[in-house]
Image (cartoon, coloured by chain):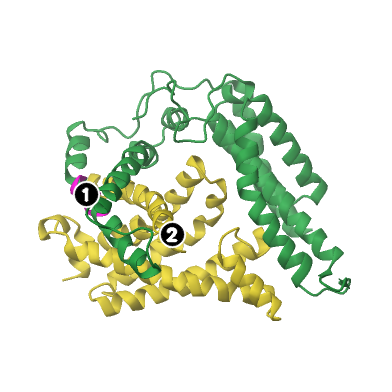
Chain colours: A yellow, B green
Amino acid sequence: MKFDTRTLVLMAIAIVINIVVGQLAVWVKLPLYVDAVGTVLVAILAGPIAGAVAGVLTNVIWGLVSDPVAMAFFPVSLVIGLLAGFLAKAGWFRTIGKTVVSGIVIGIISTIVAVPIIVYMFGGVTGAGTDFATAYMVAVGTELINSVAIANLATNLVDKILTCVIAWIIVSRMPGRFTASFPFYQKANA
Amino acid sequence: MIGQPGPHAGKSLLYVPGDSFIHRLNPLTKLVGLLWLAATTFMLPPEGMAAIFVAALAFGVIAGAGRAFVRRLLFTLLPFAIALFVIHGLLIERADTIDYGLFSLSADGLGYMGRILVRVAALLTVSMLFVTTTHPAILLKALDSHGVPPGIAYLISSPLLLLEPFSTRARAIRDAQQARGLDLNGSWRARAKAFPALLIPLVTLALSDLDHRASVLDGRAFRARPFRVVLDAPEDRPYERWLRRTLLVALPLQIGLAAWL
């Protein structure tokens, strides 16, 4: 599959947005990642393959620039890009209500992909705030894999709903002449 | 396209400039070596993982990146070690858990924690060895000289080039919004409201550049030919080519053997 130049530039910008948004989350001191806004944006405008490529490259470049551990989570970004693209194609990013549902679907499925990586590669911990919730669940007698799943599902749901809503707000605010040049978006919203 | 690593190379990257043996290896050899070592780590007992960790750390120190290694290892492994100790050492009940009154400890849990920690440490040091000794510009030249299409090279190089200006732009937006009364230190509600005020201008500004960037690229006909010719391609010695081929053949064989046994 060959992307046109505008899609290539959009993907490059989206990768940078994904990485820089992490810095914004630190500034507002909120337990958010929102590091897939760019990926979802590309998926809505240019489709699932472009979204998946942007997602995978985000983790690879993040790994090359500052955090090699990020590379291990590239399958999660791949799934987010693919899912967001397929949902956009099916019209699930047309209204705010549908966008929230898309966020829930992406949150659940990306957690299913992330949990085995966290449990089998990293022993159930991520070195982030969710470890407190995991530790609490384990302390009250829940199995490790279920504790990781519940702790990550809770944060991932909020995070992915927010990610999808932000991406939807941005796309719906863009002028028509901007979105008109993305055939995938035009077809999905026809 | 990024040029040669300059005096400020590594400012926003993990790359540490140098002229060591590892620095001089072709980036593709290091990339294949990284893949092979990462896959091998999962097939080895803890002693083997520890050997990879020590070897990669030693090569990192020889390459002059010892400080970057120690900083990254502490930054990544310390929270990991604490969380693993609490969950596997203290909280998960195992057959050998011994109650010490205030807390209970499991030797098996600590052993499991050690195995995970040494694996993460091995993976981290191996990838650190690659990123601290390989400037992305040289990696791209190696990819270009091996016939990687310009579109893929652009997708890897452009974000690396854009990171610094985007970070600067994000700081400018933060300062401008704070001057207009944006509260980054208030209640969580105030901070939650602040988030879109920082994010949306950053993204919309970035997207407004899109047409201009695409026109410039098309104007330069950057994809007129299927691949680019590199004038100063990184040296690719015959033994490196053979090493890469050997590792690429060994990789699926090892995975197959590990799955079979």
Q: Nearer the viewer, residue B137 or A161?
A: A161
**Whether residue B117 is situated above or below residue B233 in the rendered picture:** below
Residue B126 seen in this snapshot: yes
Picture coordinates of residue A171 (x, y %)? 22, 62
Range of magenta residues: B202-209
Quadrant assignment, res B242: top right
Residue B248 seen in this snapshot: no
Q: Which residue is mark 1?
A: B205
Which residue is found at the position 68% from the left and 28% from the top? B61
Q: Secondary structure at mark 1?
A: helix
**Whether residue B174 is situated above or below residue A163 in the rendered picture:** above
How many numbered badges does the structure rendering display? 2
Marks 1/2: CA–CA distance: 23 Å
The amino acid type of the residue labelled 2 equals Lys
Q: Dot 2 falls on which chain?
A: A
Task: Please tell me whether the stretch drawn in magenta is mainly helix, strand or loop.
Answer: helix
Q: Nearer the viewer, residue A10 or A2?
A: A10
Q: Which mark is residue A29?
A: 2
* Residue A4 highlighted magenta (yes or no): no
Q: Dot 1 falls on which chain?
A: B
Picture coordinates of residue B113 (x, y %)? 76, 59
Which residue is found at the position 72% from the left and 31% from the top? B58
